[in-house]
Image (tube, helix red, strand yellow):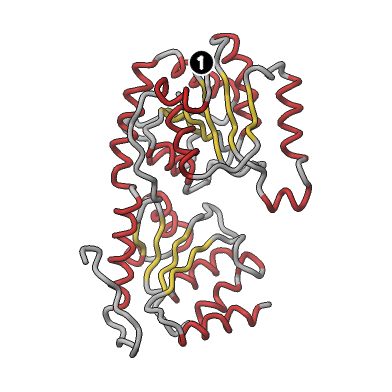
Amino acid sequence: MAEDYGRVARALDGCRVDAVSIQHEFGIWGGADGEFVLDFVRALNLPAVATLHAVTRRPTPSQRRIVSELVAATAATVVMSQAAAGLLGRAYGIDPGRVEVIPHGVPDLPLVDPSGAKPGLSLSEAPFLLSFGLLGPGKGYELAIAAMPAVAAALPSARYVILGSTHPDLLRREGEVYRRSLQDQIRELGLTNHVELVDRFVGRTELGRWLQAADVFVTPYPNLEQTVSGTLSHAMGAGKAIVSTPFPYATELLAGGRGVLAKPDPAALAAAFIALLGDPVRRSAIGARAHAYSRQMLWPGVGLRYLQLFKRVTETRPLVAGRPVLESANA
C-alpha cells in the first residue's frame, strides 16, 4: 500500500539511524514505475543517498519525473559508471554536480590460470565460455547459443555453460517455460555436447571457482541501453577475457584492451568466441588488464567510498541523542 512507504520512513526517526541508503530500480518499488519511492523519501526526516542501478536512456515522462524528483529529494545520488552519470545529465536534466560515480563492487579474486581451477569443478581441460546469473529472457542467451554451431565447427571441444537458477519472479509467473525454450534451441541446433544449462544458484565461493575456471566470460545482452552489469563486473574481478555486446557499461569498462565487444548477432559473437578461445596468449593478456583495472572496484574500497559519502551527507545534520556517529574506516 502506498501509505506504508511513508509509515516506514517516519518510523526510522525512532531508530539508531544517521542516514538512509536507497537502492533504486523502477521495478523494485511499488506503484507505476516505482513511484512509491517518492512517498518514502518525502516522509524521511533523515539524509538519504540514492543508488541508481539502472538509468534508462529513453525514459518515459513518468520515469524521468520520478528520477528527477528522487535526485532532488536526496542528499546525494550514486551511479556505477561515467556512462550513467552522463546519461542523467542528457536525458534527465540532472546537474552532474549532484552525482557521484562509485563502481559496482567485486570480490577480491586472485588471477589464476583456468587450467589450474578446472579440476576443482571436475571439468576437463576443454576450453569453455561462461555466463552466469538468474535465468530469464533479455540477457541474450539465445544469441550466444546460436553462435555455438560455428564455434563447435572450428573448435570441436569447446563448450558454453550458462550457470544459474531461473529468476524467482519468472518462475512464479510461468514456471520453467523459458529454460525449456533454451533446451529446445540447444537440441534443435545439435549442441547437447557443447552447451550446458547448470540449473542452480551458487554461492560466492563456488561462483568464484567457476569464474576462475572459465576461459572466456560472455555478456551477450541484446539491450544496448544497459548502464550496469554486476556479472560483467564480477568477471573482471576474476581476470576473465570477456566478450560482450557494446552496451554502455561494457563499452566503458572494456575499453583499453580490457575485453572484446561484438554486435548482438550470432555471427559476430561466434567470430569473437573463436578468436579468443583459439588464442590463449591474447586471452591471458586481456584478462590481466581486466583484473588490474578491477582493483579499484574491490568491495573494501567501494565500501570506504560509500562510508565517506554517508559521513559527508550527515556532517551538517545535528546529532540526534543516542544515535552513534559513523565510525571512520581507519578506526
Taking the spot 60% from the left edge, 73% from the top edge, the residue there is: 36
Residue at (31, 67) in percent of width and height = 309
> Can you say whether 96 is above or below 57 in the image?
below
- Where is residue 195 drawn, in percent x and y? 63, 23
Horizontal side of 276 relative to 326 (left or right) equals right
Name the spot of residue 12 as percent of width and height, x first: 48, 82
Looking at the image, residue 181 lies above or below residue 1 = above
**Residue 109 screen position, x and y as percent:** 36, 39
- Residue drawn at 39 percent across, 54 percent down: 86
In the image shown, does 186 or 60 lie closer to the viewer?
Answer: 186
Name the residue at the left extreme: 330
- Between residue 95 and residue 241, name the one nearer to us: 241
Residue 325 as seen in the image, left or right of residue 244 = left
Please tell me how crowded label 1 is: few (under 14), some (14-19), or many (20+) other residues with Cα within 10 Å: few
Image quarter (top left, top right, bottom left or bottom right) of the C terminus: bottom left
- The quadrant the N terminus occupies is bottom right
What residue do we see at 30% from left, 31% from top? 289
Give residue 160's position: percent from left, percent from top: 57, 24
Secondary structure beneath dot 1 equals: loop
Within the image, what quadrant is residue 242 found in?
top left
Q: Amino acid at mark 1?
A: Ala
Residue position for label 1:
126
